[in-house]
Image (cartoon, rainbow, N blue to C red):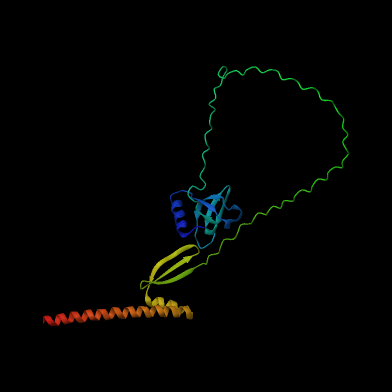
Amino acid sequence: MSLSSADIAHLETVLAQGKKPKVVFTDAAGQVAGRTGKVVALDPAGVDDFVQVAFGSDELSFSAAELRLPAPGEGARRTPAPRQRSTAPTGPGLLPDDPPRAPEPKPAPKPVVSERKPVTEPETPAPEAVVKKKAARPRAQAAKHPELTVTLTYEDGEWSVAATRGARTVVKGAKVAHTNALTMCQASGSDEVNEVVSEVVEKIRSEAAEEAARLRRQLDEAEARLAELK
């Protein structure tokens, strides 16, 4: 998971309130993955690393792919369970005295027998296992976003265009005239695009022709009623 456009808008709202929202570093951030930090500034000026995060004594810039919002309850401090006090009574005279015990008989002394231990060669210590530590993984490069993406969409009889710059949406659902939309499609120079657009244009023409025929029938009926009233 990484920061979406909605998450970035949420961070901007929280920063505008004078607060520093908390974020979690993803695996794309390298050796700091799993740690948390606080967003101190956002500078989406067309660069990838536009989120400035403070963690520990450092303050660095990261991209949206290297950060995510914490899950509900993630990072909350746990309250230690209270200690249970002993309910046993204390002080002299509160516990019954133990009954006197009879003295245990002392064991008879064992005869000392000198044994001759065979001389053995010193054991050769086993070689210590060599533990290879993985080198710290350097900070991974964030996924590169295209500098500008323009999308032309046809839906419900209307054309619209959207544009994104990096991970930030610049234009969303701006309406485009039919003639301008066809000009944009023809400028692509792609046969596949022209074929798909031709199908869409044919559908538009068919719907327009049906609408024109319906209006003509209504006009003829209206004129016929007017003729009857003369």
Q: How many marks?
A: 0
Indicate left or right for 177 with 136 as reference: left
Observer-nearest of 73 and 6: 73
Above/below status of 112 relative to 37: above
Indicate left or right for 145 with 112 as reference: left
- Residue 116 percent across, percent down from the top left: 88, 34
Residue at far left of view: 230
| Figure quadrant of residue 117 | top right
| Figure quadrant of residue 176 | bottom left
Q: Residue at x 47, y 62 (%)?
A: 168
Q: Residue at x 15, y 80 (%)?
A: 225
Note whether residue 27 is visible.
yes
Above/below status of 207 relative to 107: below
Indicate left or right for 176 with 22 as reference: left
Observer-nearest of 90 and 60: 90
Indicate left or right for 42 with 177 as reference: right
The C terminus lies in quadrant: bottom left
Note whether residue 189 is visible.
no
Q: Residue at x 28, y 80 (%)?
A: 212
- Residue 131 percent across, percent down from the top left: 72, 51
- Residue 138 percent across, percent down from the top left: 63, 57
Above/below status of 218 relative to 97: below
- Residue 37 percent across, percent down from the top left: 54, 50
Q: Residue at x 14, y 83 (%)?
A: 227
